[in-house]
Amino acid sequence: MDILGKSLVGFRDVTGSGDSFHGWNPATGQPVEHSFGSAKQEDVDLAASLASEAFVIYSRVGNQARASFLRLIASQIEAHAEQIVDRAHLETALPKPRLQSETGRTANQLRLFAGVVEEGSWVAARIDRADSQRKPIAKPDIRSMLHPIGPVVVFGASNFPLAFSVAGGDTVSALAAGNPVVVKAHPAHPGTSELVGRIIRECVRQQGLPEGTFSLLFDPGNTVGRALVQHPRIKAGGFTGSLVAGRALMDLAASRPEPIPFYAEMGSTNPVFLLPGALSSRGKEIAGQLHGSFTLGGGQFCTKPGMVFLPAPNISEPFLSEFREKVGNSPKPTLLTSGIQKSYQREIERRNVRGDLAAVARGQQADADAGFSAQVAAFQTDVSTLRANPELASEVFGPSTLLITFSDKEQLLQAARDLDGHLTATIHGTEHDLQEFAELIEILKNKVGRIVFNGYPTGVEVCHAMIHGGPYPASTDGRSTSVGTAAILRFARPVCFQDAPSAALPDELKNENPLGIWRLVDGHFTREQL
Amino acid sequence: MDILGKSLVGFRDVTGSGDSFHGWNPATGQPVEHSFGSAKQEDVDLAASLASEAFVIYSRVGNQARASFLRLIASQIEAHAEQIVDRAHLETALPKPRLQSETGRTANQLRLFAGVVEEGSWVAARIDRADSQRKPIAKPDIRSMLHPIGPVVVFGASNFPLAFSVAGGDTVSALAAGNPVVVKAHPAHPGTSELVGRIIRECVRQQGLPEGTFSLLFDPGNTVGRALVQHPRIKAGGFTGSLVAGRALMDLAASRPEPIPFYAEMGSTNPVFLLPGALSSRGKEIAGQLHGSFTLGGGQFCTKPGMVFLPAPNISEPFLSEFREKVGNSPKPTLLTSGIQKSYQREIERRNVRGDLAAVARGQQADADAGFSAQVAAFQTDVSTLRANPELASEVFGPSTLLITFSDKEQLLQAARDLDGHLTATIHGTEHDLQEFAELIEILKNKVGRIVFNGYPTGVEVCHAMIHGGPYPASTDGRSTSVGTAAILRFARPVCFQDAPSAALPDELKNENPLGIWRLVDGHFTREQL
């Protein structure tokens, strides 16, 4: 496949306007071949109109056809994996093995959703049968199920050039639910985006689906993204990125004449709680693994553990000395973009000079001449300082974390009650610790989307039960997940049929249950026909 | 029970500030005994704080205890039904039989939700089991379920003083999900609200639940409501009322530092489509029933059919002459409030003088001296006029409807495509009509929450499959329903547990499945233990 630097508006290659941009090689700090033009307002309008037209057809495509489409995308991504990985490596400097496994994850999640669509029960069909004898009035026949919501705008993420970008989780869940997708590519990996976009478009064509089922638009700034979120033909949005950008887009979505759901996953600081028993029995081991987790991928995961609560230093010494050593020996990772690197280094310098933070250790110094490299850094403070300076709980995107000592259980619980919403919380505890700190678990249920026990929050399993979301500001909608099959529920809404003749009902709601799906019939789950 | 004119902040009776108000007897236009004071900011703060404290306890109460609480409220409302109905009749002028049946519906929906809570499967438990042998990395154990969202503010509705007010659908679904509730009473029926509020509070006490589980605040204006929606301790809201008020509150909810879900059900015009075959075979019958539906309850239902599409006059004559007669013979209903009456009469007068609308018929003239009475009125126009004047599609709250003739199928389909979101759409059609107009059904799936076949949209069955909601502006969140058991899903969010030891898991997620609920285990529904 050739990279042409063009937006894909349905089946058309569209040359951008004067404002062109390049990807950058983070390892060298040099621009990468191919110039990309910004999409224009007319391209946004056309992509949205085509999506709206496509919705009429695509929303009615049968489960089998929709599943085949997703599987075809998966196999075509695998077929072009080498080219995609090479380009993504060039644009992100993420190691090739990581990008290979991310390619696998991207294909796997397409297939997982294909399975969900094919099985069919995700539509939450409900049937309450009529009772003509009921007094004082006859009971009608009421049936409902989920129905696709309409064209969805998806914003690619910087830190997952494959699994959360053009063919990533948001795109897949929106397509699986029956909605066309318009992707705003992340400008940090435009070539990768175009390659994957061309693959999806070719699958649309091969499957005989309508042109507007998929479009991909480029823009180094936020004009195109804002226009898409505000476009009357767009009915929902999915986003992964910063709090500032996510909130701004959510505000646009909410203030439209017709407000739309906007699911922004905005990252978080992912508190880790090291309880006394675990720390004294496994302190050294935890130190090594925690170091691995907060530096993984250059610390550029939404689930990076950026806040680590631990008991006063005497208990924690074996942990601390190992942790200090690991951090001190850390090589300098290359970050994804110059912007991320600059804002990371700025925040680290700010923390360096604060009197209320101690530097635990720093890794190899960043090399000013070698691309977007950065220094691993860990700091330490205590709960009182955190409570007095709540800005310390903000996410630092990059390879840094903050150790926070607590004096006693009550102080730790109070710190937990003070937390804002996060994607995850992690507890390391023995059986005894977990009994002793049972209240901590209860508090965290109201603070995060996922509680990890004796593990690490980085690494998000793509499965049915996963929740990758959390109360604001972790996401704009804590009722949802952006990873795992429940993500499909974000892009659907219920429709109800009263006394509909069988011919007018979708297959999912017919007496015969031709799809064999699970349904709630008169309040009871069953796969039987009626 | 005595009515004291006081807000109920937890277990405390709170005298309002200087700004006091009365209910009104719509039948006479005279004030009703008992003066009510407006809650003050400190009352809002206290109610929200108590609710937040109560959440810690109430969210952990077992399913049985929560179900008993709801059932106790139901039986206590029934025990006091006579006093409640008398007072509601005085404040709303709704007929006593209607209010008696609304009392029954209120108790029934409390019991329906009690059953859902007791059965327990509503939490959508999902379990993906670990696989330590998986390559390249072991698969963790992931389990998730719904968890209550936090304190909820509920706004009572003017048109359902019982079933959608203090102990109405929003309150019940929020309590059922495990959330404390702060109700802002509708000022049109304050005495009814206080009576029901005292009953709920007494049930909180009898069940040994924390004080802040329920509060009830009065205010004739919008200060208290705005303060509640903006209060940091409130985590979601439910509202039934006008588009202007609902949108204003939704905007407040979305613009908070921490945005919260706000479910406003704002009514709609509920288009009815009379197809040729049905109209020629049952025209007269439909005319009588449609008249009954649009004048029911003085036309003050969210689901009132306010727009009726029908073929050009020659086919429709039997319908039209019967409809004209029924409307002409209509008595003058008493509306709920002076404000509703005035705005209804103003809109009817506006429509009377429009050159592009014909008056089909008018009922008995309203009596200016006898309370809030109003004249039934039906108008007629055609699709071209509607398309040129989209404001004609706006809701008129009261006993009026608009007949709209279409020239051919394509014109009707275009009119359907032009529709904004509505709660319901209704189709009257023979088997042949429904085949011929199959595309109409497809279009309506994207326009409404419920499609009624050969029936009438007024009368909303409270059951598992009901959807009472719809795309904006019918509601602020078309992904939800405010009637039926799926309403519980509005006030919950998912929480996920990774590699949690059994002791740290909620019963819903333990291997043994002690509650015997339905769970999605490795992608398959089952009630089995693991």
Image: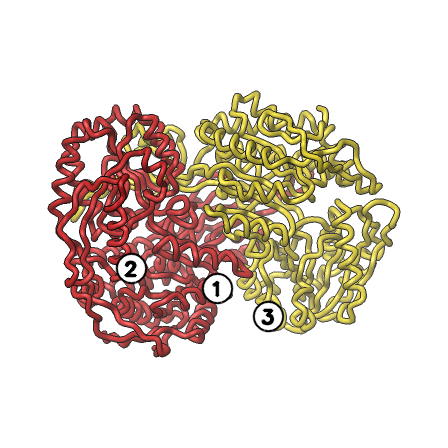
Chain colours: A red, B yellow
Q: CA distance from mark 2 to mark 3?
A: 42 Å
Mark 1, other Cα within 10 Å: few <14 / some 14–19 / many ≥20: many
Residue A168 pos. (x, y %)? 31, 59
Residue B90 pos. (x, y %)? 78, 36
Q: Give the residue drawn at x 68%, y 57%.
A: B395
Q: Which residue is mark 1?
A: A230
Name the residue nearer the viewer: B131 or A156: A156
Asked if labels 2 and 1 touch by Cβ distance under 8 angstroms, the answer is no
Q: Give the residue drawn at x 49%, y 38%.
A: B233
Label 1 resides on the chain identified as A
SS label for mark 1 = helix
Q: Which residue is mark 2?
A: A158
SS label for mark 2 = loop
User: Label 1 sits on what residue type?
Assistant: Gln
Q: Tell if the residue under mark 1 belongs to the same chain as the one under mark 2.
A: yes
Q: CA distance from mark 1 to mark 3?
A: 24 Å
Name the residue nearer the viewer: B77 or A434: A434
Name the residue nearer the viewer: A84 or A517: A84
User: Label 2 sits on what residue type?
Assistant: Ser
Position above or below: A49 against A142: below
Q: Give the residue drawn at x 19%, y 66%.
A: A29
Q: CA distance from mark 1 to mark 2?
A: 22 Å
| Disc ID at residue B414 | 3
User: Label 3 sits on what residue type?
Assistant: Gln
Label 2 resides on the chain identified as A
Mark 3, other Cα within 10 Å: few <14 / some 14–19 / many ≥20: some
